[in-house]
Image: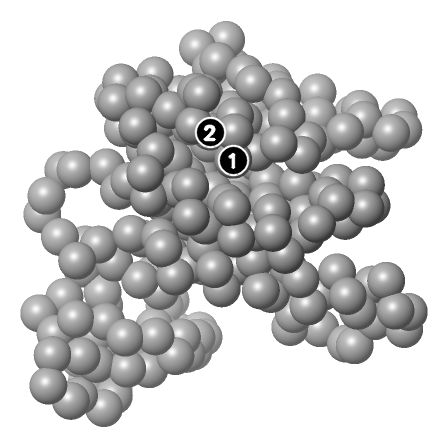
Amino acid sequence: MRRGGSIASSFRLAKSFDVSVVTAVDEFIPIGLWKEEAGPIDGPRREAVMPSSDRVPHIDFVLGGARSGKTSVALARAEASGLAPVMVATARAFDAEMEARIAAHRAERGASWGLVEEPTALAAVLVREARPDRLLVVDCLTLWLTNVLLGEGDVEASIAELATTLPALGGPVVLVSNEVGLGIVPDNALARRFRDLQGRLNREIARVADRVTLVVAGLEVVVKLPR
């Protein structure tokens, strides 16, 4: 790990139950947010430690691959916040498979959740629904981006509007998104454009977010912490 001034880069989380898994996140982590524990095999390991404050991040960004557990992480955070959880769903049920997925997500949330459905006008809905006593969960940005792109909307302007709107919301929000840029290059122009736009969207949301978490195989890797 390199340290310089008030930052430390290349956060590495490794070694659990005699299985070594190294995840490097090239992100700046403030010094003082590290805890050393005796490792079972080859010395101490460092883990990121969340601040002791109980405050809920105003903008909480959770991303990961398909079936990584990112939505479950977002739901758990909302339910532990002590605020009224409200799902902002962006999916459209175009076929029976999507209908089944939506039904499964609804069952996972339970009856205590509020629900707002909005496939495209996300920024306006967040402004309308955000309140200090609520925690909004947007699931997910990837489907929202798909809807805007296929609807021939101005994707660049929509991303910019969302990133500008989030910091001024009247209450906290957790946003769920897919990381799609780690695989092979898509073989058609539309898929390549979508991949590039998803990467740009993720960067813009991460830039304004107070906390960013990458979910890998159900495990939470902290990328950015509240200042």
Mark 1 lies on a secondary structure that is helix
Residue 10 appears anywhere in the view: yes
Q: Which residue in the structure is indicated by mark 2?
A: 126
Q: Residues within 10 Å of mark 2 (few under 14, many from 20)?
A: many
- Left/right placement of residue 27 relative to residue 180 reads left
Query: Image point 81% across, 46% down: which residue?
Result: 152
122 and 199: which one is in front?
122
Q: Disc 2 vs disc 1: Cβ atoms closer than 8 Å?
A: yes
206 and 45: which one is in front?
206
Q: Which residue in the structure is indicated by mark 1?
A: 123
The type of residue carrying mark 2 is Leu
Where residue 96 appears, as percent x and y from the top left, is 89, 26
Residue 79 appears anywhere in the view: no
Where residue 174 appears, as percent x and y from the top left, is 41, 39
Whether residue 127 is situated above or below residue 205 in the rendered picture: above
Q: Which image quadrant for residue 120?
A: top right
Q: Which image quadrant for residue 185?
A: bottom right
Query: Image point 36% across, 55% down: which residue?
Result: 208
Mark 2 lies on a secondary structure that is helix
Whether residue 209 is situated above or below residue 165 in the rendered picture: below
Query: Image point 38% across, 24% down: which residue?
Result: 130
Q: Quadrant of the C terminus?
A: bottom left
- Left/right placement of residue 206 relative to residue 142 reads left
The type of residue carrying mark 1 is Ala
